[in-house]
Image (cartoon, helix red, strand yellow):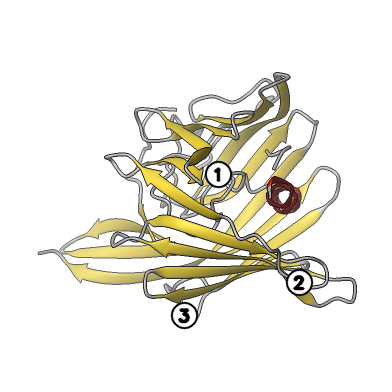
């Protein structure tokens, strides 16, 4: 089972590293200048007061275009049945897709990859059960081989939260698979998988390889502190957590400035990435830049569906 899980996870991670969205070898500032928006489903919202009206602007990620210093380019496309609607499909490049189906307190995610004749073939189906607040409390997944045949084993995972709604452990058969730790700001700072693989996040400083990497505001000024996380995504490198579904509680309220992975038995560092961001007038991330300990620089440019409405103050 572990081999199947880690094989599937590694396939996703290799593709995710190519996109540079946010390591996995085995399977992060002062207050913002402007008020942070609140993620709602796949959206974030900014509120601007103008006279007697409230101008509400909602952002929903439509596309991410990425490139790196090796000349590679990549694209992620997000599809919704309507603007502001739930996410139904994610196309990661031309070779991988995620399809989501929504039921009564259940979500099914089908992950497919192109086979050798160019057709999408399902690789994994995840089924997430949700509680009354919309958080996942149980999930199971089924892997498929290259011939489309399902595995004979379908693991069941349980998700456990603390009193403030933070996900703290993911268990399989009662044993811890992933343990998550947070700082006082509610930001995820560490995960440990199977007690031997560690991922850490820092939100107030960059790493050793960052050079002059920095974050800037809409006028090009250096951003003076923590960068609010207005995206609804989860960190892609977390095992057993869907990157695109906001059903695991809020894993962080700020965007990371540094990210590392470590194989605990040998104390070997895998990835050591530093992040810088460019924000627009609503403090929404429009560009993400990364520098890695492998000497690679990466850039992602975000395109949004933006809707706007006026509401009278009460």
Q: Secondary structure at mark 2?
A: loop
- Residue 59 in the image: state x and y as whole percent: 44, 62
Extreme-bottom residue of the structure = 81
Residue 115 sits above or below residue 252 on the image: below
Q: Tell whether label 2 touches label 3 (CB within 8 Å).
A: no
Q: Nearer the viewer, mark 3 or mark 2?
A: 2
Q: Report the Cα–Cα distance between label 3 and label 2.
A: 34 Å
- Counting residues from the start of the chain, the first of labels 2 and 1 encountered is 2
Rate crowding at label 2 as few (under 14), some (14 to 19) or many (20 or more) other CA atoms within 10 Å. few
Q: Residue furthest left?
A: 314
How would you rate the neighbour count of disc 3 (Cα within 10 Å): few for under 14, some for 14-19, many for 20 or more? few
Looking at the rendered structure, which numbered label has been put on residue 278? 1
Which image quarter holds the C terminus?
Answer: bottom left
Determine the residue positioned at 51% across, 50% down.
Answer: 234
**Counting residues from the N terminus, which is met first, the one under dot 3 or under dot 1?**
3
Instruction: Quickly name the residue at label 2.
Output: 149
Q: Is residue 36 left or right of residue 216?
A: left
Instruction: Select label 3 or label 1 by which is in front.
Output: 3
C-alpha distance separating marks 3 and 1 = 27 Å
State the separation of the CA atoms marked 2 and 1. 45 Å
Name the spot of residue 126 as percent of width and height, x first: 57, 64
Residue 153 sits above or below residue 102 on the image: above
- Say whether marks 2 and 1 touch (CB < 8 Å): no
The numbered dot on residue 82 is 3
């Amino acid at each position: 089972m572990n081999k199947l899980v880690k094989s599937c996870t590694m396939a996703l991670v290799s593709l995710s590293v190519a996109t540079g969205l946010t390591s996995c070898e085995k399977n992060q500032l002062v207050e913002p200048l402007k008020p942070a928006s609140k993620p709602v489903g796949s959206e974030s919202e900014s509120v601007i007061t103008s006279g007697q009206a409230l101008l509400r602007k909602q952002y929903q990620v439509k596309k991410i275009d990425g490139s790196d210093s090796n000349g590679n380019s990549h694209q992620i496309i997000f599809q919704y049945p309507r603007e502001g609607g739930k996410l139904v499909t994610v196309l990661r490049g031309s070779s991988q897709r995620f399809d989501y189906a929504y039921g009564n307190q259940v979500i099914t995610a089908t992950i497919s990859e192109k086979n050798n004749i160019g057709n999408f073939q399902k690789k994994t189906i995840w089924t997430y059960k949700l509680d009354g607040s919309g958080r996942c409390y149980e999930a199971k997944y089924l892997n498929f081989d290259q011939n489309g045949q399902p595995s004979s084993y379908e693991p069941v995972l349980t998700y456990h939260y603390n009193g403030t709604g933070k996900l703290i452990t993911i268990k399989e058969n009662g044993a811890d698979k992933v343990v998550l730790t947070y700082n006082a700001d509610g930001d995820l700072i560490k995960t440990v998988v199977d007690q031997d693989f560690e991922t850490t996040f820092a939100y107030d400083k960059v790493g050793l390889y960052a050079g002059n990497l920095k974050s800037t505001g809409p006028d090009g000024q250096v951003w003076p502190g923590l960068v609010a996380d207005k995206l609804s995504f989860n960190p892609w490198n977390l095992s057993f957590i869907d990157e695109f579904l906001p059903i695991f509680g809020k894993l962080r309220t700020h965007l990371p400035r540094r990210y590392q992975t470590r194989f605990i038995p040998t104390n070997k560092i895998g990835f050591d990435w530093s992040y810088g961001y460019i924000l627009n007038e609503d403090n929404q991330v429009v560009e993400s830049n990364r520098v890695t300990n492998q000497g690679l620089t990466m850039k992602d440019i975000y395109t949004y569906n933006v809707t706007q409405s006026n509401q009278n103050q009460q």
